[in-house]
Image (cartoon, rainbow, N blue to C red):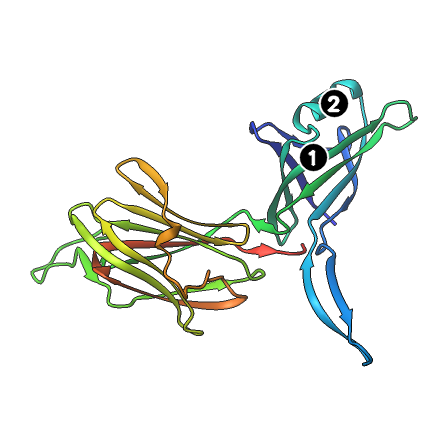
Amino acid sequence: MFFKLILENENGDKIDMTTTANQYMTSKIEGLNPPAGTVSTSSYAGMNGSYLNNAFIEKRNIVIHFEMRGVNIEQKRHLLYKVVKPSRYIKIYYSTKNIDVYAEGYVETCEVNNFEELTNGQVSILCPDIYWYSTVSQMAYYSYLNGAFTFPFSIDDKGVPLGKYNYSQIFTVINEGDETGFTLEITAHSQHENAASTFTIYNADTDEYLQITGQIMGGDVITITTKTGNKTITLDRNGERKNIINRLVSGSTWLTMREGKNRFRLWAWGLENLTVKLIHTDAYLGV
């Protein structure tokens, strides 16, 4: 099977583990499949069977087995050490004919056998975030006024529209990966001092919602992230960024992007003064 594997450190330095057989030859990659699950159960007293306490997925462990071939083996080894450093952040890009994804983690070990007839080794990476993510994100937009001015164009006596009012308040997004969170960016038009308040996003199919209370001023940018392990609500006002998770209304749900078709509905006092962008990246347990 044809594949490509690239490692990138926090400084942006990259090393291609599949360039040619004359440099690095990746012979095996562990950790492409879904990570192991942990299931805890307890027995009933005097009854058959048991009941579930909890179940969760362990961290991902990616192990890359490789060989070094050709000339300048020592130079290649030091190049590997420069990019892949134990305990440091690393980003793994993996692609085949049908998929192009990445995972993020931290280097556990980088071992090279220097005194063997064939120089080989392995890199072990631990990924607290269990998903492989698509390198391309999907974006859905809401704006009360949609642009309609296009080129090339000609204007007849009837004129042409420069914009159209948008009366639909529903996002539709197709998630081709596993269920995961998303990011929502809410921008208030700067020409309105008190642009909006009480912003709410609903799952149009389940009626679950996420709502933040309080005034949204002109120029405000509110970012909501619903990803497990990174659930945040921040406000950027006049260049100052602060946490406003305390404005989350009781009863709200950290909405997720479920598998398949997802529909979300927006509501706010002054919604027409807001531009909303939903950003979603397909996530996969196994590739």
Q: Residue at x 76, y 69 (%)?
A: 42
Amino acid type assigned to the residue bearing label 1 in the image? Val
Q: Around disc 1, counting alpha carbons within 10 Å, would you say few (fewer than 14), some (14 to 19), or many (20 or more)? A: many
Q: Residue at x 73, y 33 (%)?
A: 20
Q: Quadrant of residue 211?
A: bottom left
Between 277 and 271, the one lying in front of the other is 271
Tally of numbered discs: 2
* Residue 187 visible in this rendered orientation of the protein: yes
- Real-space CA distance between mark 2 and mark 1, rounded to the nearest whole angstrom: 18 Å
Which residue extends farthest front? 45
Q: What mark, if any, has residue 76 been given in the picture?
A: 2
Amino acid type assigned to the residue bearing label 2 in the image? Lys
Which residue extends farthest left? 157
Q: Is residue 232 above or below residue 265?
A: above
Please give left or right for residue 262 compared with residue 178 in the image: left
Rendering coords of residue 210 (x, y %)? 39, 62
* Residue 148 visible in this rendered orientation of the protein: no
Q: Is residue 79 above or below residue 249?
A: above
Q: Which residue is mark 1?
A: 107
Q: Residue at x 82, y 80 (%)?
A: 46
Which residue extends farthest bottom? 47
Rendering coords of residue 204 (x, y %)? 40, 72
Rendering coords of residue 154 (x, y %)? 16, 54
Q: Secondary structure at mark 1?
A: strand
Q: What mark, if any, has residue 176 been given in the picture?
A: none
Quadrant of the image for the C terminus? bottom right
